[in-house]
Amino acid sequence: MKLIVKLILGIIAGLLIGLMAPDALVRAALTAKVIIGQLINFTIPLIILFYVMSGIASLPKNSGAMLGRTVGMAYGSTILAGIFAFLVASNLLPGMLSGMAPVTEGRDALTPFLDLEIPAALPVMTALVLAFVFGVVISRRELPTLKSAVFESREVVEVFLNRVIIPLLPLFIAGTFAEMAYEGKALSTLDTFWKVLVLAIVMHWIWLSTAYLITGLIQRRSPLGLLRNMLPAYLTALGTMSSAATIPVSLRQTKANGVSDEVANFSVPLCATIHLSGSTITIVTCATAVMMMSPNLALASLGEVIPFLIMLGLTMIAAPGAPGGAVMAALGVLGSMLGFGEAELGLMIALYLAQDSFGTATNVTGDGVIALWVDHFARRDGVVATPGPAAATGEAPVARSQS
């Protein structure tokens, strides 16, 4: 939550600099934006390489059908959530944004004092392929030395993210908004912000309600009871902004929904790193809005968005635990597949981080649906015992006094 406050202050500072400060200060803000943007671009392939590789290498070797079903349902849920978000956003946003504040007459664009270029160590797609090749082999062959090196490399990237990139994001956002304010584009951008954020949050709630309704009806449980049991996990994720930090609560509430200990202990921690339906809804909604706002981009078609979603679901595997980890991992795909430039990526970061807690909460609550279905198939196949009456209704067990 402190990061969100800093980002808001960064937006305000950027607006004031762009509207009121002398040109030299605006150029200084642009210089900071350029340097930080280069650092972000340098870090993107490293995030994809080491986080995806460590996530795949951590998968159990002999977990059989349960692993396949969990991964398949989590990945499928992420892609379907993205398709749902694009269909809604591409149809509703044109009407919502048609009456936005007009772009005012600004001044001619300025150039930064220093145009620094920091080339990435390897392309995004190369990093993704390497991550899968090494991750699968490490998991299958159980190579402890290489696995340890991958996790230590991931720790290096994580420290760089937490100590350098994340703290510098408010300055990056300030530079972005200083440039837009200087050029007269800030008012229309802010007018768009709140509409996009409200739409994304409403879609989160619709997605969760639909998932629990369908699950409850098919499995003959109370959808409202199932969703009510997961509410503590949703609220915890709102505060922590981290799926990993919410695992203890989501694990407890998943078991309260009648999911067996074996399935819950396996699926909940795994889904915390691979199931990102809420984050995908936000990224797709924000990306759709940015494409509509940017004069350099055209709105993508559904045929272009589906390949993007397939790659997005892969690049966000084991996304960093730092706030905004999903969007940081997605920047490479946004640039390579949708043509986003530095300005568009800056808007994506600002839009996404403004509601990161709601996306995380949707991810965590959606994990409960995946666990319910994995448990359903496990019971059908006789892997675990049949649930009791309390689990069948979706109600949490009630403790009885010993009087």
Image (tube, rainbow, N blue to C red):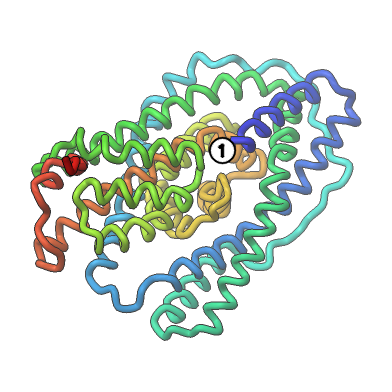
Q: In which quarter of the image is residue 261?
A: bottom left
Left or right: residue 301 versus residue 177 is: left
Residue 132 x/y as whole percent: 46, 71
Q: Quadrant of the C terminus?
A: top left
For this rendering, which residue is in front, 201 or 289?
201
Q: Is residue 66 above or below residue 187?
A: below
Left or right: residue 207 versus residue 172 is: left
Q: Can residue 149 be seen in this view?
A: yes
Residue drawn 44% across and 41% down?
237
Residue 272 x/y as whole percent: 40, 54
Q: Is residue 336 visible?
A: no
Q: Mark 1 points at which residue?
A: 353
Residue drawn 35% across and 78% down?
61
Q: In which quarter of the image is the N terminus?
A: top right
Q: Is residue 361 above or below residue 275?
A: above
Left or right: residue 121 versus residue 48 is: right
Q: In which quarter of the image is residue 3?
A: top right
Residue 158 x/y as whole percent: 62, 59
Q: What element carries label 1?
A: helix
Q: What residue type is labelled 1?
A: Leu
Residue drawn 30% across and 37% down?
207
Residue 298 x/y as whole percent: 51, 37
Residue drawn 51% across and 52% down?
337
Packing grade of label 1 (10 A; few <14, some 14-19, many >=20) is: many
Q: In this view, does 12 lie above or below 362?
A: above
For this rendering, which residue is in front, 68 or 339?
68
| Residue that protrudes farthest toward the front in the picture | 403
For this rendering, which residue is in front, 128 or 365?
365
